[in-house]
Image (cartoon, rainbow, N blue to C red):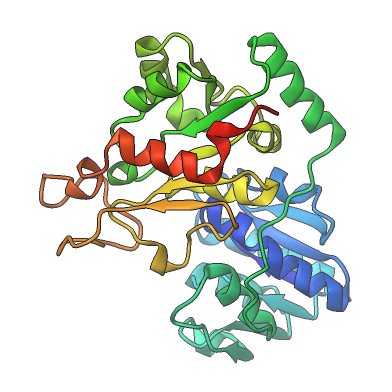
């Protein structure tokens, strides 16, 4: 009997859930997944997923009426097990209303709505915390995974050809939905890198304006923000020598396609469990600040007004980290 996974958190969280999906599929076969409409395309082609059920919790399906309507649809599927990695009341209530007899969540979640609980490790990588939901131990080798189609790869190839970008190139992801997570020197970094190789800026619709400003300052760079679908963007990132990114979703896309990363952590820290874990990945952050970290996600603005966690990182610091990945010396 097919199991259900309910994961309606942020895009990066959905990508990090893919090792859990794989682990569950190895035991019980491909799973069904309830997720956001934005994240759904990333999972539709995944080998561990039988079917993706979009849930627009802030749009067409918002509120009690939308929750009940989705619960009725799920009840008709007669799922026997539901796994709830997102510790939200809405997810727990959805599984309960759907009449799923076995509901597995974390002990620090909505325990009264679960039938089984697993301890959520307080430390370690988020992937390992998610695997604990399936009773799996930590695995330093576990990475996110995506299945990109031939059409996704062809679209990325076509876009690069149209943009006049030939390998090698480097990808930069300057955006984040959390304002204080954005490093402020991407334009200067782009100028430095464009002297050596092509530079492609990647991100979603909310990053277009930011990327356009960088391209205006450095015309050699090319803006791919919102120009491709999520899977096509992942395919493009997979062609890059390196991805320089803030603590945001592009980091996890790069991990899933095997591209080395330089990740800039400002108000957040890797110890929260959302950092890279590849052999060539590099992590940057300003140590010794009493105010860092200031929140789990990073506020919209620096609460103290100085943004020292980002202002303290220079372009030279990032260039050295890029060099440490080996990307500056590759020509393939």
- Residue 271: image location, x then y, percent: 40, 68
Classify the position of the C terminus by image quarter.
top right
Using the image, determine if residue 213 lies above or below residue 39. above
Q: Nearer the viewer, residue 327 or 72?
A: 327
Q: Residue at image x 63%, y 91%?
A: 116
- Residue 293: image location, x then y, percent: 26, 62
Using the image, determine if residue 286 lies above or below residue 75. above
Q: Is residue 59 visible?
A: no
Using the image, determine if residue 74 lies above or below residue 106. above
Q: Residue furthest front?
A: 329
- In the figure, residue 160 lies in which quadrant? top right
Using the image, determine if residue 91 lies above or below residue 309. below
Q: Residue at image x 66%, y 58%?
A: 144
Q: Residue at image x 60%, y 43%?
A: 38
Q: Residue at image x 80%, y 81%?
A: 80
**Horizontal arrangement in the rendering, residue 97 relative to residue 296 (left or right):** right
- In the figure, residue 208 lies in which quadrant? top left
- Residue 209: image location, x then y, percent: 39, 21
Number of marks in picture? 0
- Residue 251: image location, x then y, percent: 53, 47
**Horizontal arrangement in the rendering, residue 278 relative to residue 25 (left or right):** left
- In the figure, residue 330 lies in which quadrant? top right
Q: Nearer the viewer, residue 332 or 2?
A: 332
Classify the position of the N terminus by image quarter.
bottom right
Q: Is residue 107 visible?
A: yes
**Horizontal arrangement in the rendering, residue 242 relative to residue 275 (left or right):** right
């Amino acid at each position: 009997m097919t199991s259900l996974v309910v994961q309606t958190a942020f895009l990066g969280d959905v990508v990090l859930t893919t090792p859990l999906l794989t682990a569950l599929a190895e035991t019980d076969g491909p799973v069904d997944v309830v997720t956001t409409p934005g994240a759904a395309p990333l999972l539709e082609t995944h080998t561990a997923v039988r079917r993706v059920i979009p849930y627009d919790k802030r749009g067409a399906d918002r509120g009690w009426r939308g929750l009940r309507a989705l619960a009725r649809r799920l009840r008709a599927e007669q799922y026997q097990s539901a796994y709830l990695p997102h510790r939200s009341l809405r997810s727990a209530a959805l599984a309960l209303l759907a009449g799923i007899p076995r509901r597995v969540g974390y002990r620090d979640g909505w325990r009264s709505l679960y039938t089984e609980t697993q301890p959520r490790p307080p430390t370690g990588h988020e992937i390992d915390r998610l695997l604990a939901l399936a009773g799996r131990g930590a695995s330093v080798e576990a990475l996110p995974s995506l299945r990109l189609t031939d059409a996704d790869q062809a679209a990325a190839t076509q876009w690069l050809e149209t943009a006049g970008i030939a390998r090698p190139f480097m990808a930069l992801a300057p955006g984040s939905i959390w304002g204080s997570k954005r490093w402020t020197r991407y334009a200067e970094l782009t100028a430095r890198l464009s002297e050596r190789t092509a530079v492609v800026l990647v991100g979603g619709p909310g990053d277009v304006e930011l990327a356009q400003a960088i391209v205006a300052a450095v015309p050699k760079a090319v803006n791919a923000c919102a120009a491709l679908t999520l899977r096509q963007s992942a395919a493009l990132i997979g062609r890059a020598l390196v991805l320089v990114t803030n603590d945001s979703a592009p980091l996890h896309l790069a991990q899933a396609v095997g591209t080395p990363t330089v990740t800039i952590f400002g108000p957040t820290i890797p110890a929260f469990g959302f950092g890279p874990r590849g052999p060539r990945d590099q992590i940057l952050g300003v140590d010794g600040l009493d105010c860092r970290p200031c929140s789990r996600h990073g506020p919209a603005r620096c609460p103290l007004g100085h943004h020292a966690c980002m202002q303290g990182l220079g372009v030279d610091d990032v260039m050295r980290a890029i060099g440490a990945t080996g990307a500056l010396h590759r020509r393939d």
